[in-house]
Image (cartoon, helix red, strand yellow):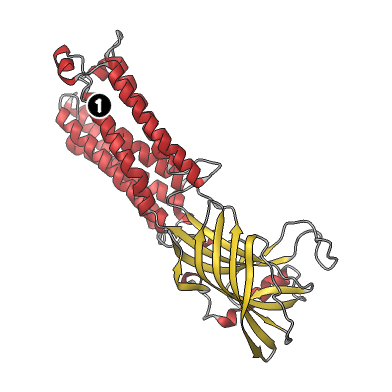
Amino acid sequence: MPPARRSTRTVVLAVVAVALLVIAAVAASGIGNPLHDFSPYMTRAAVAVVCAVLGLSVIAALLLRPSPARPRRLGWMALVVSVLCLLATGSIWVAAGTGHSLDKAPGVRVNNAAETQAVLAAHGYGKRKPVRTGLMIETLEFTGASNVRLTGFIWQHLPAGEDVKPNLEFPDAIDGGVGDEVYRDPTPEGQVVGWRLKATLRESFDYAHYPLDNQAVWLVMWPRTAGTVLVPDFSAYPPWNADDKFGVYPGLVGGDWNTQFSTFSLTEGTERTNYGRPAHSIDGQDAELTFSVGVGRQYVSPLLNRLIPLIVITLLVFGSLFVVTTDSDRRSLSGFSTWAVIGFCGSMMLVVSVQHGTLRSETASDGVVYAEYFYFILYLVIGLVALNVIEHTSKKRFPLVDWRGNAAARLLYWPVVTVLLLTATVFGLLL
């Protein structure tokens, strides 16, 4: 290539690299704290990560100047691209796995009594008698893909009287509910009564980002007495802040989950029936009080449990590329044959498919969850390796595949795997 043309190409690539890095910097500067509330910044994060990886890859290409005449530099370029993709993927994992969003809490969130009254008035419930209700969650356990078990305490401010019963019910509970009475104290308005809470709730959770998913566990409460409406007992807590996780025991036992936030919200039912009770709305628009707890999965263990076996398989498949050869002497030493490698690829495909089926059973998700992309990538890579073997024993040969004794496949293997992983991560977690 003439020096003038080479210089022009270098300048163009340098300008492209700088432009990509500037775009990445601008996109990243618009992200607040991704470890706190990640969902509003996902598109910006995708732009920042992709542009940063592309920009740094172009700079690496300018510095290394890889070419077929310099296979060692091609190897270094492949290493740089692979490392950049792995670093970008890891950064997305950390941000997605530790971030949380209050948007998953249903209804209109309220933080004090004034906000509660304003929301009730705006929806036509201002004339109903408020029943202050509070709770403290002590344990939270996922007993299935759609079931969660809560225990703790719940209390209400009720009129004085010995025969007063809880003025609430849990429509999402499939087991348990309000338990034994724990205390009953007089108040200027009547009395406050506290009970044990033990309920198993049936809810719909979104596992699309598994194992980097965050969930909102919500406890919906209906009033039993006509003409009343349940409101949060904010007087029983410090000034409310969702990040302070009031209403959740500080030493809460949540299994594989970490508590991220707690909030009260007011919602409206959508049942479109009054259950035969004339005092209730037939359109199902009665007010509901909801207490939501945001939880994030402790993702390191399930992520490693999935990745370690797949990494071993990926390494074994990569090793199979080194026995692929057209040299008859090397074939006799390595024991290479088309059927031997295809059989190996088939056995690896079977192992991957079994683990994939186990993942589907665990999440019970209707759609594709993020961790499934790991298996899709391996299906594709194993299939490409099998095609590579077939090409080496076929009559119609491709110069690129046969270049330097299958060196092209070995050089491209890890960049292809890591680029596919980063692509799946961007689309699976950010877009």
Residue drawn 73% across the image and 85% down it: 162
- In the foreground, 237 or 80: 237
Query: Which residue is the extreme one toward the bottom?
Result: 188
- In the foreground, 178 or 190: 178
Q: Quadrant of the N terminus?
A: top left
Q: Quadrant of residue 299?
A: bottom left
Provide residue 3's location: percent of width, then percent of height: 17, 28
Q: As drawn, is 234 to the left or to the right of 386?
A: right
- Above or below for 261 versus 379: below
Count neighbours of disc 1 (C-alpha within 10 A) and say few if under 14, some if 14 to 19, many if 20 or more.
some
- Element type at mark 1: helix
Q: Quadrant of residue 340?
A: top left
Q: Amino acid at mark 1?
A: Ser
- In the foreground, 20 or 351: 351
Residue drawn 20% across the image and 14% down it: 326
- Above or below for 26 versus 54: below
Residue hosting label 1: 320
Residue drawn 74% across the image and 70% down it: 224
Q: As drawn, is 405 to the left or to the right of 185?
A: left
Q: As drawn, is 91 to the left or to the right of 37?
A: left
Judge whether residue 20 can be spotted in this image: no
Query: Which residue is the extreme one toward the top?
Result: 395
Provide residue 306's location: percent of width, then percent of height: 37, 44
- Above or below for 32 versus 250: above
- Above or below for 166 versus 35: below
Provide residue 149's location: percent of width, then percent of height: 55, 62
Provide residue 174's location: percent of width, then percent of height: 64, 59
Query: Which residue is the extreme one toward the right?
Result: 278
Q: As drawn, is 54 to the left or to the right of 375?
A: left
Query: Which residue is the extreme one toward the front?
Result: 180
Judge whether residue 134 can be spotted in this image: yes
